[in-house]
Amino acid sequence: MDSRTLIELERLPFLERLKSKYSWYLNEVESGYLGGREGVGPVDSKMEYKDLHTDEYNEVLVFGSNSYLGMSNDPYVKQKVCEAVEKYGIGSGGSPAFSGYTTEHKKLELRLAKLAGHEDAVLLPGGYMANLCWVSGLMNKNDVIIYDKNSHASVINAIKMTGVPFYTFDPEDMTTLEPIIDRIKARKPDTQIFATVEGVRSVDGAMIDLSSFVEICKRRNIITILDDAHGLGSVGKTGKGTLEHQGLIGQVDLRMSTCSKSLGAQGAFISGSKELIFLLRNFSYPYIFTSGLAQPTIAAINAALDLLEIEKPNRVQVLHENVTYMQDRLEEIGLKIKRGVSGIIPVYLKDGIAQELNKKLYKRGLFANIMEYPMVPPGLERLRLSIMSTHTKKEMDQAIEIIKDVMKEMGVI
Ligand SMILES: Cc1ncc(COP(=O)(O)O)c(C=O)c1O
């Protein structure tokens, strides 16, 4: 089923929608569906996945993990987690507003706030929740939000749930931002406007020009929020993210990053001024009404941050060397990619071939992700390769050989 048909499906009444989606799923399984992959063992540059059809486990090269720095299976991180389990046990036993907040939570929040150049931070169980947290904690129907047209589903969902009036803009073209601000101000001069962008864009690894965004928003008293889910750990000299890369640490009002990608763990934080974080900590439902992070997760995040601080050579540099190597090799074999500085390399594809390509790559032993609707608009399908600092040269060369063979077979190159 192509993306346009999927859009049509969404318009059906519930029972028809359920039946159509389920029969689509059964058809997909018949034709080698990859969505139900079941991995075994630690997340790393190679993993075993269960074949849905034969129930056998096959080892594949992993070029589709957000664990860009290989922290998920790092011996130091695992040791620190084991020590934390001995010392603190497992779950937090409650929400941070009740019994689920400890000195370890507080210390980590302050460590992350410092990393972001902000006064304070709140920890949440994931980036999705963190985006719900700042949207619903700060905004109501009297405000307006302008959001990056590439924003993550969690931001868009949160906006829908809160009912805050919204506008979208294209952060690739910052000249579109001010006319929107002018339109809003002309109609409602006293409205508080918020504006949000993604740092490293999840769908293609690109980075926007944040300095213009920050400059325009500061001049017009707009409250800025950066979603740097993929930036933390993957860009910036010491891995502090997009703001470090662009020399703008502390220059947005709020910054959200997840700990589930480069830090290899789970959870997320939002950092900002004491006042704004106070508002989230005390009034935002996604923070108040969900359990605090589990202690092993806190230990894993701390250990990954330790490694970012102490390791030489820095893992971020190794990641960048791997990214450059893969970009050069992909271009060498004739593929159209977009060069960026993060761990994500998008390979652009003709409409309608993404699924077939992904199945063929997987059969040959390469696990990568494809971006199709609803992640990207119909017609902009791409293969998204995620590079890790732990990929060896041999693994990268093997991946290139597989990609080359399959792309040739499919007539792409
Ligand atoms: C841009 C962006 N924001 C937020 C999230 C959600 O983060 P998490 O997986 O920690 O919930 C993601 C996840 O992929 C993302 O890409």
Image (cartoon, helix red, strand yellow):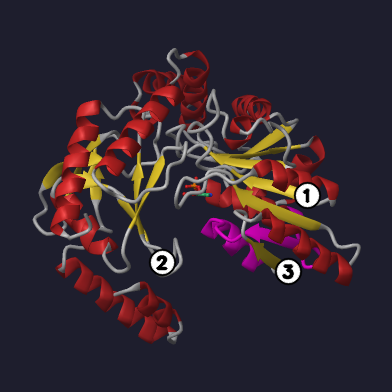
Name the quadrant containing residue 195. Answer: bottom right
Q: Is residue 304 magenta?
A: no
Asked if 208 appears above or below 186 in the picture, the reply is above
Location of mark 1 (residue): 217
Percent across and percent down for residue 118 are 72, 31
Measured in 3D between alpha carbons, the distance from the residue under mark 2 to the one under mark 3, in whole angstroms, is 24 Å
Location of mark 3 (residue): 165
Residue 261 vs residue 235, the one in the foreground: 235
Amino acid at the residue labelled 1: Cys
98 left or right of 4 in image: right
Percent across and percent down for residue 405 are 14, 49
327 left or right of 120 in image: left
Rendered image: mark on residue 373:
2
Name the quadrant containing residue 122. Answer: top right
Measured in 3D between alpha carbons, the distance from the residue under mark 2 to the one under mark 1, in whole angstroms, is 31 Å
Amino acid at the residue labelled 3: Pro
Name the quadrant containing residue 255. Answer: top right
Q: Which residues are magenta?
A: 138-161
